[in-house]
Image (cartoon, rainbow, N blue to C red):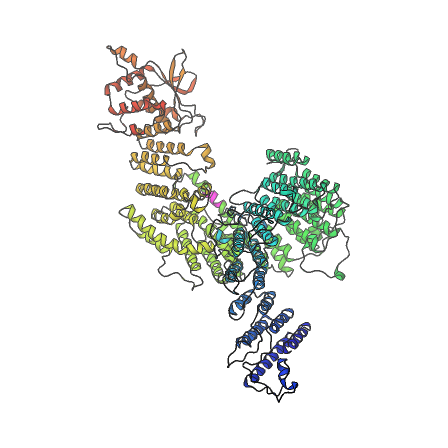
Amino acid sequence: ALSRATVQAVRAAADGGDYALVGRVVDAAAEYAAAFAERSDSGGLGGLPAEALTGAPDASKDGDAAAVVPRRSAPLALLEPRLFGEALDALRRSRASPSRIKRMWSTYMDVAARGTSACTTPKSPAILTSSPSAFELNAALRALAERGRVRAALELYRGCGVDAVRGDAYTASALFGMLADSIPDPRPDDSTEGARGTLDEEEDGGGDWTGLSLDSPLSSSSSSPCWQWGEVIALLDEFEGGGVEVEGGGVALNNRAYAAALKANERASALFHGGARPGSKPRGGGGSVSNARKHLGAKEAMGVLERMKRAGISPDAVTCGMAMAAFDRGMQWRAALKLLEAMEKSAGTAEGSTSSWTLPAPNAYAYASAISACARCGEGAEALAVLDRLRSDGDGGTRHAEPNTWVYNSALAACVDAKPSKHRPRPSSHGRIGAALDLLGRMEEDAERGMDTAPDTVSYNTALKAVDGLFGPMSTDEDGNIVCDSIEMEGLARAHERSSHPALSTASEEAVVRDLLARMKARGVSRDSITYRNAILACRLCPDATLGMLETALNDSDFSASLSLRGDGTRSKKKLSRRNRSPRPASEGGGRFLANTALSVFASSGDVKFVSKALAVMAKHGIKADSVSAKHMIRTFGNAGDCNATLEALGALDEDTESNQILVDRYDINLIESGVPLPLVNEPLYSAAITSCISHHDLPSALHALTTMKQHGLSPSKASVEEIILEYCRLAMSLAGHEFKVARKERVFNRVESPLLRPRHDESSRRARAALEMTRLLDRPSPRLLSAVAKACAAAGLWAEGRDALHSLQLIAIRRAEGSSITPALDELPDLHRQLMKFCARSGDVTAAVHFADIIQDFSNKLASMPKPVSKRRGALSVSAYLSKILDQSEPSSTGEAFAGAAAAASDIVSQSSSSVSTYNIGMKGEDWKLLMIAASKSGHWKLCLGTLPFLQPFVQKTHPRHVHDSGKSIASLDRQYERLARALTAAVLCFEMRSHYGWSVRAIDDWIEWSGRRPRKEAVFSACRILAARGIAQEVNNLVSQVMNIPPSQLLDEDEYKYPYERAVYTEAITALHRNGFYDHADELYAEAVSAGHLPWAAVDSPDEVGSTQLKLDLHGMTLAIAHSAVRVALQREIHSASWDEEPVSSAVSSQENLWDRDVLIVTGKGKRSEQHMRPVLRPEVQRMLLEEFYPPMNTVSVPGNIGALRIPADSVKAWMQYQREQKGVRLLAVAGALKNLSAGTRLKSLLTRRPNGVADEKRPL
């Protein structure tokens, strides 16, 4: 009776909103129950009959003797636990604070600690009639969740204790639901950030989905950056491993609980797609983002399904639909198709199945998700195949779901919004519009068959969005006609052939857009503002078409313009009351929205002429401009480069008729009569003008705008100031790049051989300092701004200032990282670290590079040590200490000892930061060490290059082809990863060449080959060949080339590989290095080996002379000086000796010479058309010098009449030289001639040519 009365009182207090009264009622009831329990325990009932307390009749009423109430073995309990659940629910419905809710729960826990009527102690009589249940716990959790106190709810759940309160499936559902709701929505512009916001998870079907088994064992841990999902996984483990004992152990969860978990997975995937955070900007060039920075939604959904299978809980349609949506968002089209097929198969065999775990029949949502996943990944054929299965009858003539317009619209949206990944590029514009038109055609076909698939406004709007950028950039010809610069006619033809759409046969976005609009009108589909907005944006590359589309929209009588204030494009957060709304035509809001869209298009291109035309169209249709229109016009003047017109526009908006007349005379733009509410003086307009002036290097105009702004009592907002500073930073980096180009030209002009560039950072440093000073005046600048300032300072050579900005950003990241795994500051740091190292590498400033490397590693160690005190681990060796140790040491006695010590120290540092790199993607990675190597190479610090190689070793080893199966990556992916690191070896070997350390060059290349299993870059081999030849170790050059050629080539080829193959380049440079240092015999050996392998051309060809007899012709076209030198030497030896060396001479000397040779030799050197100095041949004088100085007796040459590009060696000179060679009978020439004799058979000559018997002549001895 007491509990029922108290519940009624609590509900009444809740209906009145008096949460204080709820607490007082519950406290009074608890105190009364406690006092009554004490009295009953001591035997004093206060004279009350037993019937009043227990509800049982008194024995005295039956006429017996005076009955005595017996002493009870336990005190009486008056309160039911449900009372506290009702009280907590009442507080939830009121305005009670979270602290009051937690106080109510504490009261309940104190009451529950006294025990129940079935179990009590003499010291604390029980006042609850039964044990606490999940109802009260769920009420408390709901109350805290609705107030956004998710962490407090989790603490409450985990603090209640297993023995006190046990949750149920509803508890799990409530916890998962509140965690999902606490995940913030991504900003609308997050989905458009393709540089880092790409969904490039591992492309994996997930194993055999017919039985829903994963290839890898299920792990309870999650590496997701979303802490809410980590809590979901932990709670799943708790519910499945403990709680209420049921058959099989754990809490009996249901589909509702697992669906709530999958909802949290979906929201985490939306927020952490590819590691992007809300508000973060895309990163250029970019390196790829590690999987630790992403929430792998598809993988986590697979894990949830595996949990359900292990628990024997068959998923329903909602659960499977949410898992399918995760596969769609994660671009796991194979997994989506596998799950869909399993659902179809399970539905077909459900009646006769004896399995306790089954899948539901697929519904329209499941088919839509599968189609969307295929279309999003560019698998148009698979998407259409799923559509065909949906349209046709299934097994036994049963159709699982009916296609509808919503299913098709999801596929259309996926086709248009498909994002690129590391496995596939984004589908081309022709592929997207072709797929969209195919789907529109299928929708119309199904509608004719009686299905609810008629294309609606959303369908056509999505198709119009796909047209954007179809034909590439537009330009004008000499007659002023609009032409297309980069149209892909083949792709257009394929799209036209696929879709059978007549508009695709014409090279114009406008034609395709107008055709789609005509189809909408013919089928009675309404056009809204989004329709014409997409149409205008689709024609943005052609200003005439954009303006024409605006007029078409405003002239459309069926255009629905009944838009709310929020729907007309203003997106105002506060709704105006009806009495404050000024009367206006129904179409004005939508018309202004479209007009502003066209003005934004013209503003992007800076086309002032079409802005004037757009204003005329607006005036014609009675549309007045607003502040958004004025801002677009100011941006137009700025992008057109007319900063003076920007200032005049500000004056005209301030009702300055003189400024307005200047704009009328110059551009025919009348702002006063455009309908803009005057005077229009606000901060966004002036900030846009200032930013435009700064971007065009017009600082006086920017200062004038700022002064005028202050005169009006306006001050730039923090966001505007940050935009101005960001523009300064962009300007500083642009000027720094230009200064480097000037320095590079000066180095070429002055013929300076040093790799270091010393640009004069006059303008860029001033802009960077100005940005830094303005940033220091801001209170709490954003991480994005600090990152930009650090980059600008580093680009301008202000290394100390750049380090200060970096320290500030890292300090913010450390403070915020303690409460969350990822913050905007942490998100900015990886790209900032890479850019700073790039600037150091570009300038060759090794001191700054070492300092930045030390800062990065120190910060990585701090993150790795969290949540411990932010400090380095004991015994950690900083990068600067290690590298200074390397720089200070003397040259080691052996390379093995140096590499062993360096590798040990490097592994210590790399292991320290491995955890922070995997968690936060922060630390010195392979590309960062490469950039440090480049900076050291340009500075000539060979010891630093030597010490950095061990840091690169683990990153290079991960790209070895033997790791293909272990890493799960393709060989092409490993090749791309290797190419990003390969330049480090080139930088090191170039530095060793500069310091003439040939031993380190060979050792570095040998180790690199061992680490990577690939050929080193040809530039590194070139450098090693040059230094070996210069130090007189010619045989090592041949050995190095043979070693490199024995390694299989990579599957990933650069663009230069097709023009100048790797093998040809290496042989050419090696022969050139040997030739420059006078090792002609070794050069000849390499040339013979290259010719036998087909990498270099053979010079000798037979051709008839003037009298019809054959002559030996040596064609040296396209050969370098060194190659031509070896080609002539080797060709003469091979051709002449193979013809007569083995013949026995006759008795007379004359007949012997006649047997030797009787033909002239024609050497084609070229006329010098492709020489550095036109018509000044290089090969001709070199060949003449060689024949005179290196052959004995010297061979005379004569010019060929009428052909200055050829030389002829008379037969007499050849005979004299051959006679001398027969007399010498050199053992080495015999071996060379025998090997060259078999050259045409393709035999390898290295083994013979490198055989050097005793008594061989010196290298430069005449032949």
Front residue of this view, candidates 227 and 242? 242
Q: What residue occupies the far bottom of the structure in this picture?
A: 66
Q: Is residue 128 visible?
A: yes
Q: What residue occupies the far left of the structure in this picture?
A: 1255
Quadrant (top left/top right/bottom left/bottom right) for the N terminus: bottom right
Front residue of this view, candidates 449 and 543? 449
Q: Is residue 394 visible?
A: no
Residue 1074: quarter of image:
top left
- 665, above or below 1240, in the image: below
Quadrant (top left/top right/bottom left/bottom right) for the C terminus: top left
- Magenta: main secondary structure: helix
Asked if the stretch drawn in magenta spans residue 999, the answer is no
What is the x, y in percent for residue 302? 53, 52
**Which residue lies at the image location 52% right of the left edge and 64% below the top edge?**
245
The segment highlighted magenta reads: 738-743
Residue 1188 as seen in the image, left or right of residue 83: left
Asked if the stretch drawn in magenta spans residue 740, the answer is yes
- 1030, above or below 210, in the image: above
Front residue of this view, candidates 20 and 1174? 20
Residue 782: quarter of image:
bottom right
What is the x, y in percent for residue 1017? 40, 39
What is the x, y in percent for residue 774? 53, 58
